Amino acid sequence: MIKPNVFICEIGSRERLTKSVFKLGVVNDEFADLVRAGHFANIKCGRENLLRRPISVCGVYDDEVVFVYEVRGAGTEWLSERRPGEFLDIHGPLGKGFDFPGGRILVVGGGIGCPPMLFAAQTMRLFRVDTTAVLGFRNADSIILKDHFRAFCDNVYVTTDDGSYGIQGTVAGPLEKLLEKGGYEAVFACGPRAMLSAVASLCARYDTQCQVSLEERMACGVGACVVCACATRIGGVDSMSRVCRDGPVFDAGEVVWDL
């Protein structure tokens, strides 16, 4: 650690998962000891990119912390060009993670929202608690981490919008069938806002606890700039919460979805 919560980490592994999605493992035992499911990190991406890039943690394997990210701009493009043996300046772990219940959980991921759900499933496996995953993608070419989820989950359901793999449609279909059967203590979800809103609605209908990890644009990562503010209603009081500091994980019932 070079200063509070800032670590210099060596890149230990790199893998291209799809045309635009990469998996990167960084090695630092002190950093790895602090990370929990639901946390994210702000990664410095070259001198030309002033703002760090927030990326959710996908998993921890001994002293290696794994990130999975999609190339969306200059910063993540720079990151995609890094190779094992190089070093990254990482601020983290940041944010509030998942609150794990005692019983079985369902993890629901949409697209690039799947990586933090894998970390949640990995954590539940350590607790020896049954976990089921429902994963949604645009098409077969965009599927990521399917086999990784199968290593940690008892059941994995994959949906694609166009039906090119698995169940055609969205995650809402298999999720509702599973909630109808019951037996789940909670649902954890991360993905596009429309997906999260649908998941929250289903969980409310079936009286199941739901925690969502919100995806918002961020700058500072510590709550100072308020770029990532989102509308919440906590204890009947409307407010603006900071996703980076108050989240990214929220109780789904506290998020104001109808904006």
Image (cartoon, rainbow, N blue to C red):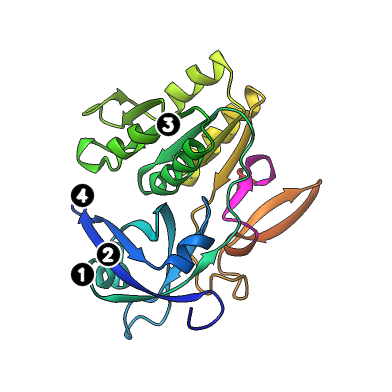
Q: Which mark is residue 18?
A: 4
**Answer yes or no: do the residues labelled 2 and 3 have beta carbons within 8 Å?**
no
The numbered mark, 4 or 2, whose residue comes first in the sequence reads 2
| Secondary structure state at the residue bearing disc 4 | loop
Q: Which residue is mark 1?
A: 83
Q: Which residue is mark 3?
A: 133
Residue in view at x 26 percent, y 40 percent: 143
Query: Disc 2 residue type?
Result: Gly
Q: Which residues are magenta?
A: 246-255
**Answer yes or no: do the residues labelled 4 and 3 have beta carbons within 8 Å?**
no
In the rendered image, residue 106, in percent from the top left (x then y), is placed at 51, 30
Q: Is residue 66 left or right of residue 164?
A: right
Between the C-alphas of marks 2 and 1, the distance is 8 Å
Query: Disc 3 vs disc 1: which is toward the camera?
Result: 1
Tell me if residue 183 comes above or below residue 6 in the rendering: above
Query: Disc 1 vs disc 4: which is toward the camera?
Result: 1
Q: Which residue is mark 2?
A: 12
Q: Residues within 10 Å of mark 3 (few under 14, many from 20)?
A: many
Q: Residues within 10 Å of mark 2 (few under 14, many from 20)?
A: some
* Residue 46 counted in the magenta span: no
* Residue 249 counted in the magenta span: yes
Q: Is residue 224 left or right of residue 65?
A: right
Between the C-alphas of marks 3 and 1, the distance is 31 Å
**Answer yes or no: do the residues labelled 4 and 2 have beta carbons within 8 Å?**
no
Query: Disc 2 vs disc 1: which is toward the camera?
Result: 2
